[in-house]
Each structure stands twice: as structure tokens, then as C-alpha cells.
Amino acid sequence: MKKILIIGGGLAGLSSALFLSNDKYNVEILESSPKLGGRTYSFDYNGIKVDNGQHILMECYSNTLEYIDIIGSRELFEFQDSLSINYINDKRELLKFKIPKYLYPLNNLIGLMSFKVLKIKDRFAILKLFIKIKFVKTNSYEDKTVYQFLRMNNQSDAVIQKFWESLVVSTMNTSTKIASSKMFIDMMKIIFFTNKRSSNIVIPKVDLSSALINPAVEKLELNGVSISTSERVISIISNDEKVIEVETNKRKIKNFDILVSAIPQQNFRKIQFRNSNESLTFPKLEYAPIVTVHVWLSDNPLTEKMYNLIGSEFDWVFNNGTHLSFLKSNATKLVTLKKNEVVKIVFSELKKYFTILTNIVIEDYIVLKEKNATFIPDLGSLKERKSVPNLFSNLFFAGDWTNTKLPATIEGAVKSGKDVAQKIDLQNVY
Ligand SMILES: Cc1cc2nc3c(=O)[nH]c(=O)nc-3n(C[C@H](O)[C@H](O)[C@H](O)COP(=O)(O)OP(=O)(O)OC[C@H]3O[C@@H](n4cnc5c(N)ncnc54)[C@H](O)[C@@H]3O)c2cc1C
């Protein structure tokens, strides 16, 4: 039986292990941190589980849904019947964007036409572009940002600001002026034109670790996968053809046939590579921050599960019952502020957007700043992601940064793991 060593116990590593743990392979995972899940994790806070950042999934996450089915956690997710988003403005007006359940794919257009945040003229402009996106060939837009693509297609600055900017920042963690239009159009096709359910939002009903990580670990252990935490890989030794030894902070490992690196590229760069005559060229990707603030109020004024805050310092607020979670993607400004300054903004936004009784106070809060939350899917990233090194026949790379053609997401991480498993199976390297 071939022995496969996987570095990294984030979603990409767990997914690689899950799709590889069968009769043909003996799999071991090495994770440097004491916990599994990487950037998708939850921690204990005063006896309740809190996520490192509110995560949203979509029903077009086909690889993730397959992963969820394998680990048996589908019932821990809430699936929308059809895409529905509550927008709220600073006049406290609730404006729904709802795509009807039936008449796919026309339902997308019907939903857009009844979206009251926009003027009728603007809705028509967006509608025309939606139809174009369904049919357009994306390769012709490799050198254009989303902003350039939108302007070329008659989207006014006002429409970009009111509609597209929020969509792009929420899904790509960067602005329209930086995001690659090719990746954006590909993603829009997947979300809106795969099937009638693909645009539905999927939210974990429980904390992220309970929904995505712990059941995977249980399944892997049942399949005989061994998982070592608090074990950091520090160097990799190769001969001219293959990787032959992995050194961790605890031991030297030689008894493996295949090595899968499922760690971010900037972490891989820190691993010493010894004996190889080759120099590793790695994609050069920039990263963008996400700020999440969990707040516990003396009374919860929110009635819906989630709201998009139009024109706010935060993009979204999620109603998690016991606490609210404010989320800001591409949070270049918030990430520089002190935690108490961030919380002041949260409270002032709460008062602006919701009717808050005067006696409601913030009882507790946590500000989580993920400085390198996701890589920036800019124009350069398209080329850079194609340059993942392919030096040794027994070394494979997984991770949301590899060339999945998706932005850095749960789906990208899970897909990368499944892709590696398929490559190993197909190439049958030994
Ligand atoms: C705040 C936040 C919000 C997000 N929101 C969303 C969302 O709403 N929807 C969505 O789809 N995605 C979202 N994402 C993105 C998603 O979380 C990531 O794309 C995904 O988790 C990346 O998984 P990964 O396995 O590729 O990498 P990671 O999760 O980074 O896993 C890599 C693992 O490798 C380990 N490691 C590193 N170096 C070594 C070493 N030398 N030896 C051993 N182990 C090592 C790390 O400790 C880590 O556990 C969000 C991310 C953040 C941070």
C-alpha cells in the first residue's frame, strides 16, 4: 500500500486525505497548529463555540457539498430555497433581493427586475449584462479588471457602487478596480447559470469546526488516517527525481511514497528545501484582510438571519442568536484600527441601521483581524497561479491558492484537495 504524507490540516489537507483514504493508500496528515481546520476554525469562548470569521457557502460549491456528504454533515447546514438577501440602508428600510424559486434561468432576471435598491434604468443595464455573462467567452477578458469590464458594458459608476462592488468584495475579497474580470465572469457563470439551485446561500447552523472539520476528522480516523497536530514541517529533502525525506520539529520521516503540500504558498516558502538542484519558483500572490466582530448585546434587535448593510463600514451582519457577527471583507482600513475603535464603529452602525432600544448595551465583544485572509484575485494572480512548481513526480500541491480558477474559498480549498487525489490516482506515479 502506498504511503501518502499530507502537510497541512486545513480544508485542502483534509479534503486531499478524504478523497485519498481508500484501500490503495495509507495516509498521514501533519499539522503545525494544535487544532485542525486552518482558516476555517472555531474556538471556545466562555463556553460557546465562536468562528474565526463568519463563513458563507453557496449551493454551487459542488466539491464542498460532496465533501459534506462524505463526512455526513449535510443536516448541519441551512440551505436557502432560492437566493434571498436582505439589504438594509441607513434609513432602516429593508429591501429584499429575492430570486423566485421557479422559471430558471429567467428567475434570475425576474429577481433583478424587482430589486428596489436600484432605479429601473439601472436594473435593465444589469439585466443586459447578466444575459451577456451567460454567453460571453471569458478568455477575451484576461487583461481586464472587473471595473473595466463593467464600464465597457454600460454599467454606470452609481450602479457599480450600489450593486457590483458589494458582490465583488463579498465573493473575491477585493474591489472591482483590482479583481480579475475573467475570474469574476467565470464565477458568475457558476453561481447563476449552473442550475436552478446554484445561487442559493448555504450557512452552517452550528460552528464551523462542528460542521466542516470535526466530522471530517472522525471519518478520516475511521478510515485509518493518522493525524498529528502541533507538528510543523521544517525541511524537505530530495534527490534529483523525488522527495525522499520530511523533517518536522519532532522527527524525520522517510517511509512515504507521495508528499502532498496543502499549506499556503507563503508557508511553503519557509520550508527549507535541501539537496535539490532546482530552484522553486512560486506564485507571487498578495493577500487581503477580513475583519469579523462578534458582539454580545443585552437584547438582540435583529429579526432576520443576515443583512447586507448598504453604505456601511461593514458589509454584513449575521444574527447568530446568542451573538451578532459583523463582517468586513477587503478590510484594509478596519484592520489598522485598535479593537476598541472597531467596536465603536460597530455600535454606531447598529444604531444607524436598526431600531435599538436605548437600554441595549454591548456586553462583550471579540474583534478578529485576519490580515492574510485570502489572496487577492487580481490580474497578475491569473498568470501566477499557473506557475505552481512541478519538480518531482511524488510532490503535489493543494490549497485555495493553487490554480483552481476559483477565488480563495472553502470550495477552492476542497476542490484543490480532490484534484490532487484525482491526479495521484490518474498518474499512478509508481
Ligand atoms: C475571516 C475569513 C473569512 C472567510 N470567509 C469565507 C467565506 O465566507 N466563504 C468561503 O468560501 N471562504 C471564506 N474564507 C476562505 C477560506 O477560509 C479559505 O479559503 C480556506 O479555509 C483555505 O483552506 P486551505 O486548506 O487552503 O488553507 P489553510 O486553511 O490556511 O490551511 C493550511 C494549514 O496548513 C498548516 N500549516 C502551515 N504551515 C505548515 C507546516 N510547515 N507544517 C505543517 N502544517 C502547516 C496551517 O496551520 C493550516 O492549518 C474566509 C477566510 C477567512 C480567513
Image (cartoon, rainbow, N blue to C red):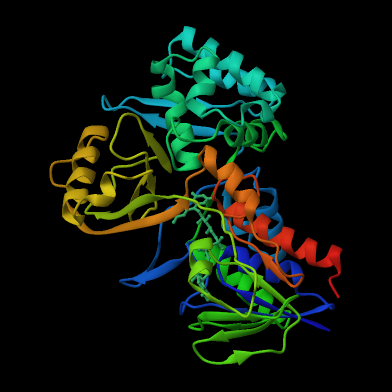
User: Does the rendering let one see residue 37?
Assistant: no
Left or right: 170 in relation to 216: left
Extreme-left residue of the structure? 358
Vertically, is 366 above or below 357? below
- Residue 302, image x, y percentages: 33, 42
Image quarter (top left, top right, bottom left or bottom right) of the N terminus:
bottom right
- Residue 166, image x, y percentages: 43, 32
Vertically, is 395 above or below 250? above
To which quarter of the image does residue 309 belong?
top left
- Residue 102, image x, y percentages: 69, 26
Vertically, is 16 above or below 333? below
Taking the spot 47% from the left edge, 52% from the top edge, the residue there is 374
Q: Nearer the viewer, residue 348 or 257?
A: 257
Q: How many marks?
A: 0
Taking the spot 16% from the left edge, 54% from the top edge, the residue there is 340
- Residue 183, image x, y percentages: 60, 37
Vertically, is 99 above or below 211? above
User: Does the rendering let one see residue 101?
Assistant: yes
Extreme-bottom residue of the structure? 251
